[in-house]
Amino acid sequence: MTQAPVGIVIATRNRSAALAETLSRLGALPERPPVLVVDNASTDDTRTMVARDFPHVRVLALPFNRGALARTHGVRALDTPYVAFSDDDSWWAPGALSRAARLFDQHPRLGLLAARTLVGPDGAPDPLNEVLADSPLGPAADLPGTQVLGFLACASVVRRSAYLDAGGFHRLLFFGGEETLLAYDLAARGWGVSHCPDVTAHHHPDPAPRVHRRAVMRRNELLTAWLRRPLPYALARTRDLAADAGHDGQARRALRETLVRLPTALHARRALPPNVERAARLLDGSPGVTA
């Protein structure tokens, strides 16, 4: 039997019911991709449920919660040339992974493909779709779609070798806005990151508000700046967050959590090469900051 070119990695923790829905959807795909569930030390019945109801799905059980780094464990455990990420509340449209594989085959520099995302039962376009499609980085002759430096993890497909070359998702960020740093690191290694709207993923997020989500996003945005952006840029973003912390509890939490992690970020700091920094400035509107 010919191996499928795209495998799927799902990082999950304590969301057994949602995961079961996702696995049912993925199991119906015509591509029949191999699926690997990386369990972030769940305390519910996740592993029992998968073994009972989806015996064809592999489970990699981690001894403790590794956050987004679980995806890297999954990529290493698969041997398919391309790896699609799903969350336990997302899945791929029929034919999407075949289309993605063809795009990777046709474009050897393509490291990551950011798909079009449809949200909820009504399939509403995620607002991020328009942001990615309108990226000022535009097209490249050797890449499909539009060049970007951001994506939604649960609607992305990577070239396995490129992902591992870039180091995967960074351990310092854990979860929340971890995508930008990976896009930076792929581009810094010469890999293309493209939005390809003819590849579609479905996302059915839990409508319940996630406590401290905004704080985590702001923390990781600032840590990403300290890890990769010019020092004047990182300092300016820190001043912005500190100003907000005076009247915003979420900003105060984000600043506190950033400062705890800042020594590690500084130790791991690796400034972007000039061409990638120029692209990042174009996207974030900070042309006056120099590398």
Image (cartoon, rainbow, N blue to C red):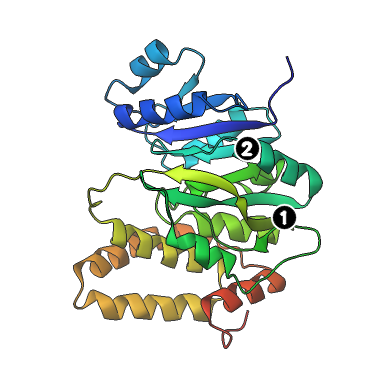
Looking at the image, residue 6 sits to the left or right of residue 94; the answer is: right
Q: Residue furthest front?
A: 122
* Cβ–Cβ under 8 Å for marks 1 and 2: no
Does residue 227 appear anywhere in the picture?
A: no
Depth order, front residue of 224/211: 211
Quadrant for the C terminus, please: bottom right
Q: Position of residue 46 (x, y in %)?
A: 34, 23
How many residues crowd mark 1 within 10 Å: few (<14), some (14–19), many (20+)? many
* Residue drawn 56% across the image and 74% down it: 283
Q: Element under label 1?
A: loop
How many residues crowd mark 2 within 10 Å: few (<14), some (14–19), many (20+)? many
Q: Amino acid at mark 2?
A: Leu
* Residue drawn 64% across the image and 67% down it: 272
Q: Residue furthest bottom?
A: 288
Label 1, label 2: how far apart the Cα atoms are: 20 Å
Residue 50 found in image quarter: top left
Q: Which mark is residue 97?
A: 2
Q: Nearer the viewer, mark 1 or mark 2?
A: 2
Q: Position of residue 22 (x, y in %)?
A: 42, 31
Q: Position of residue 170 (x, y in %)?
A: 51, 50
* Residue drawn 67% across the image and 27% down it: 79
Of the image marks 1 and 2, the number of the one nearer the N terminus: 2
Q: Which mark is residue 191?
A: 1
* Above or below for 270 versus 31: below
* Above or below for 46 versus 164: above
